[in-house]
Amino acid sequence: MIKLQGKLPREVYVACSGGVDSMAIVDFLKRNHQVNICFFDHGTVDSKAAHSYVASYATKHNLPFLYGTTNKFKHEKQSWEEYWRVERYKFLHSINAPVITGHHLDDCVETWVWSSMHGTGKIIPYAYKNVIRPFRLNKKRELELWADINGVNYIEDESNQDTDYTRNYIRHKMMPNVLKVNPGIHKTVAKKVTDDYSDTLNTYTH
């Protein structure tokens, strides 16, 4: 069963990449919410193909569609991952409405591992500005199961297998070994995710 953190407004934007995570979330949310789809085109071949796929899905299901693209050159000292992240969030923060992203528990674990190697383990926050991440307590497998059970179509981005990107290296090369050392790391990080949400509520209510 998919779990939500927090009560979402009736109308939301969903950041959709065309992959299984975001497509499952769109299908889940549009049953009880007025969903608008937003897509960020990173300018790569795979991203342009995903742009076409998501736009077609939005048209087929009569969902409003908004997209953004990169609008400046990458600084030579920036990695492509950092450049795309900065540009993507500029776009998401420009939307004058709540934007839901598909960050899940596996993303949180990977971020915790990654950031711990730099000195301090960090949790992907529940909210920042208008961006909300209410699916952080769900493993990726739970979203995949939703897609399978409900016949949700999606596409695979081949670049997600490219371990030259740090995130993919951690996901495909490091995480299997992390799970051997600590098979319960998802429970550990889930507790931190829950605590982060409680801290967020306290911040908003005081």
Image (tube, rainbow, N blue to C red):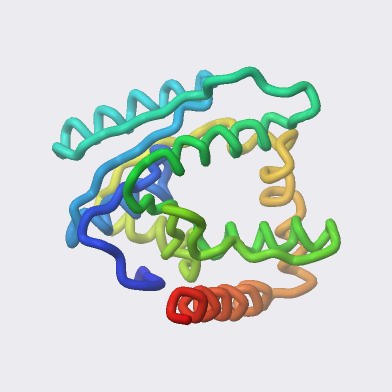
Q: Is residue 200 visible?
A: yes
Query: Which residue lies at the image location 51% right of the left edge and 73% below the top edge?
Result: 200
x, y percent for residue 5: 40, 72
**Residue at horizontal 67 percent and vertical 58 percent from the top:** 110
**Is residue 3 among what the camera can see?**
no
| Position in image of residue 58 (x %, y %) | 23, 35
Residue for point 56% across, 33% down: 87
Residue ranking furthest to the front: 206
Q: Is residue 192 above or below residue 168?
A: below
| Quadrant, the N terminus | bottom left
> Percent x, y for residue 163?
72, 38
Above or below 44: residue 23: below
Q: Looking at the image, which is closer to me, 44 or 132? A: 132
Horizontal side of residue 193 vs 15, given as left or right: right
Q: How many marks?
A: 0
Horizontal and vertical percent for residue 83?
65, 31
When the figure is inspected, residue 177 is found, relative to residue 58, above or below; the finding is below
Q: Residue at x 37, y 70 (%)?
A: 4
Given residues 90 and 176, the one toward you in this image is 90
In this picture, residue 53 sits left or right of residue 122:
left
